[in-house]
Amino acid sequence: MELPKGDTERRNMINFLRKEGNLILVDENKIRPVQRATFKPHSNDEMKEFMPCPFCKGIYRLNSLRQHSKKCVFKPKDENNHNVASLGQNLLVFKLSRKSFLDKLRLKDEVFATMHADRASFNGKSDPIICQYAEDYLRKHKRPHIKHAVSNKIRELGRLLIPLKDIYGIESLLDALNPIHYDKVVHASHIICGYDTEQKTFKSPSLAMHLKTILLGACLAAKTLLLKRESVLPVNNYVETLKVVKTFQSLVNERWKFDMGSLALKDLNEKHSSKPKTLPITSDIIKFRDYTTSVADQSMAVLKENIRDQISFKKLTEASLVLTILLNRKRVGDVQYIKLNTYLENQSSDEQEECMKALSESEKMLCKHFKRIVTIGKGSKCVPILFPKNGQTYIDTLLDARRGNDLIPKENPYLFAAIGTKDKWVNASQILRKYSENCGAANPGTLRSSRLRKQIATVLQILHLNESEKEQVASFMGHTKKTHEEYYRLPQDVYQTAKISKLLLIMEKGEGADHQGKSLQEIDVELEAMNDDCKQSDDEGENDAEPQVPENDIEDTKINEEPEIVIRDKIRNVTVTNKGSEGNKRGKWNTIQKNIMKDVFKKHIKNKIPPKKHECMKLKDDHKELFEQKTWVQIKVFVYNTFKFKKE
């Protein structure tokens, strides 16, 4: 009052006091906005349409609040938080009755300000049990990005309270954690999960499945507050309320699988099985790698000339991150959270002389070519990362530029740091999406971290690794061998069709005992009733008549190296005759013919590789009189049988 009348500062202070008083009236369900509403609220809950300004405490419509916050006279000059609606929502949440409780939680500073301001978040922030549950979840984890997961937990329980309030009048989660209201909680869960009673399906089956875990966690949080006798809970008899919560917890444990869990799991499995499990193809991966490498090379060249070039620095950081994920097939979080100190530490294992002596020369060269670091990955597990020579060059260029410019503050601890931030990193998921769409790949949607991990796990099926090697691969990928086999290694359709079908045919014919001790690779079966398919493939193939191919002649090895071999070459005991020509009759080989073939194809026999068609035809042309009555297929079969049944 010492300021003269009409003074601007005096007027601003009086307005601030008036607005702060109007904010206190919100507790009494009285709303006095700074600007009178010229519309009729869409619902009875008028606070859906209004929110206080976090700086001057005035109540505005949501759209007006965003405009007002830009020119609010009480806004600090260094304030750069654009989520003013969330900050204003926090003012409503921190009422006098809850302020002392919420001030003790980390949620207030780490999570609340990042949440979108809507009814679900308001319900979650206002409920002490939801806040305690989210606080317990936040304390269990160390990584900074966990705040987004905590925010989702708060919103899920906040969404559950919306139908409970609107339909049944249950105002808090503590009231809902009562056995009397169990069926109401199940019905509200059906609503937020999009349950279809006729089709028995869910729009969000995964939410329906883990709602049980969330409710059990909420029960544990409620018991914690009741045992501590927190005054924030509107409870008179803490002992009786604790018994009620324990009973509800037992009911969820025993009944949830019948009411939600089992149906949700079946629906989720059916939806997964109906979706095509497409994996990245080799050509797309090569395009992706080449494009990213070209971006890195160009950016590095520019950055070496001008270390303050912000665009080149950003592109080189992104490209280095993508190439590291692509080579190592790691989760995006395992790579994007690598600390600078972790990369700079020398973790060489050259001192392990005995291990190095056991390696081959090529393996020793690989050890020198790659730099290996160990970072902390999902679940605080140690995850190894390999950097090739070119990747090390890119990163060294980035580090030299960081020392010579001010694009990255020295306080930023991350290797792939975001420009102009003290504690932010480059978002690998967004970068993978951007680069995959720009590289010209046929299926850019498959070039994602999880798809790349599943692709390498699927390809490993054809390598026949032993158990020790599988464990080493699983350890490098950052999970257990069981997880690798159950979740990452997808059923490969070609492998199942070619290999498993042999086993099924053997069982169908009752010949299982005849193949005792053999692997699927060694087992060969006799296919019948395939004359039509053989004739069709013969019409599309060569004009040479094909012989009766003896059993165990051709197996499905080296198929990728033999593009000329068509399916009919695998069929035994089938005679195929071309139109207008007589089929060649099968006869025995004489000694001269055998010696010539063994001499000409001695390298093939040594390397156990069947000859190709043009090689067999060349042999026929060179020795026309000896092989006049023989087809190229018969020559191929003889060479194959020679190394197939050769005694070791």
Image (spheres, helix red, strand yellow):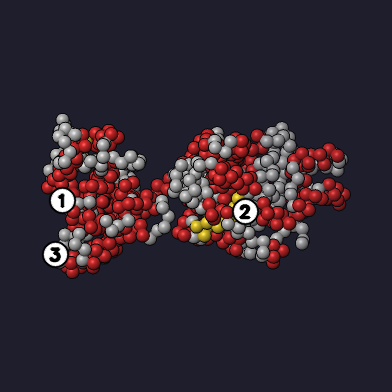
Residue 446 horizontal/vertical position (percent): 50, 42
- Mark 2 or 1, nearer chain start: 1
Residue 220 in the image, given as x and y percentages of width and height: 28, 63
Please tell me which residue is depicted at 15% across the width and 47% down the height of the picture.
Answer: 24
Q: Measure the alpha-carbon separation of dots 3 and 1.
A: 21 Å
Q: Position of residue 447 (x, y in %)?
A: 52, 42
Q: Give the mark toward the camera: 2 or 1.
A: 2
Q: Farthest top residue? A: 38
**Mark 1, other Cα within 10 Å: few <14 / some 14–19 / many ≥20:** few
Q: Is residue 497 visible?
A: no
The reply, left or right, for residue 441 in relation to residue 142 is: right
User: From the viewer's perspective, is residue 148 above or below residue 382?
Assistant: above
Query: SS class of the residue under badge 3?
Result: loop
Q: How far apart are marks 2 and 1 (CA)?
A: 61 Å
Q: Nearer the viewer, residue 77 or 427?
A: 77
Q: Is mark 2 on a helix, strand or loop?
A: strand
Relative to 419, 389 lies left or right = right
Residue 604 coordinates in the image, percent (x, y): 78, 49
Question: What residue is shown with label 1?
Answer: 169
Residues at badges 2 and 1 in contact (C-beta under 8 Å)? no
Q: Can you identify the residue that label 3 sits on?
A: 236
Secondary structure beneath dot 1 equals loop
Residue furthest bottom as drawn: 239
On screen, residue 451 above or below 140? above
Dot 3 or dot 1: first in sequence order is 1
The N terminus, quarter of image: top left
